[in-house]
Image: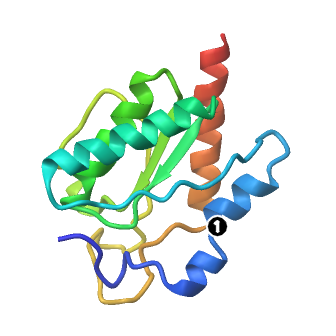
């Protein structure tokens, strides 16, 4: 379970990351940085990394977060926990993940109300095409728009 060929982000994708490009160019957003979080094997460690990531974001006084996952299946446990930990701190959060035909997560929580599915295959499944199901500019713009809406609601 996890990263397959079509959800695998190539080196070129990382160098030209659409999400970073869209967020960095938006004049309404003050990009604080990128936080990379691993995907541990054990559940205790899975909970720890999500809690630590959320504490870091909170300490930076971040107004909103877009969390993106380049895997799926078991990795959704870490993803869901991190989204929840950020949301519990009152920080607006938008998620991005490959979901496809599953149309659901292994685990869910109340903070997973705005998730952008970056599945691109017509069948909604993992394919053997390298990088087919990765974030593109349209996905990034959608995630940023959703985050701006959540941040605006928080202000009101």
Instruction: Find disc 1 in the rendering and name its residue.
Output: 18
**Residue 64 drawn above or below residue 41:** above
Relative image position of residue 76 (x, y in whole percent): 26, 53
Number of callouts: 1
The reply, left or right, for residue 40 in relation to residue 129 is left
Residue 105: tell me if it is visible. no
Q: Residue at x 36, y 73 (%)?
A: 122
Coloring applied to the structure: rainbow
Relative image position of residue 82 (x, y in whole percent): 36, 42
Relative image position of residue 51 (x, y in whole percent): 35, 37
Where disc 1 sits, the SS reads: helix
**Residue 11 drawn above or below residue 64:** below
Q: Residue at x 71, y 53 (%)?
A: 23
Q: Residue furthest right?
A: 27
Q: Nearer the viewer, residue 87 or 41?
A: 41
Question: Which image quarter holds the N terminus?
Answer: bottom left
Residue 4: tell me if it is visible. yes
Q: Residues within 10 Å of mark 1 (few under 14, many from 20)?
A: some
**Residue 141 drawn above or below residue 137:** above
Q: Residue at x 31, y 27 (%)?
A: 110
Q: Nearer the viewer, residue 53 or 3?
A: 53
The reply, left or right, for residue 106 in relation to residue 49 is left
Write down the quadrant of residue 153 in the picture.
top right
Question: Which image quarter holds the C terminus?
Answer: top right
């Amino acid at each position: 379970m996890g990263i397959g060929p079509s959800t695998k982000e190539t080196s070129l994708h990382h160098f030209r990351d659409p999400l970073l490009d869209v967020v960095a160019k938006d004049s309404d957003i003050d990009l604080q940085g990128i936080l990379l979080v691993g995907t541990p094997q054990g559940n205790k460690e899975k909970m720890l990394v999500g809690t630590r990531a959320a504490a870091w974001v909170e300490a930076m006084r971040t107004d909103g977060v877009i969390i993106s996952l380049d895997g799926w299946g078991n990795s959704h446990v870490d993803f869901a926990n991190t989204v929840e930990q950020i949301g519990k701190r009152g920080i607006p959060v938008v998620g991005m993940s490959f979901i496809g035909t599953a149309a659901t997560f292994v685990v869910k929580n109340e903070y997973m109300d705005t998730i952008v599915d970056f599945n691109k295959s017509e069948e909604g499944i993992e394919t053997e095409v390298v990088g087919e199901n990765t974030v593109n500019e349209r996905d990034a713009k959608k995630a940023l728009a959703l985050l701006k809406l959540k941040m605006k609601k928080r202000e009101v």
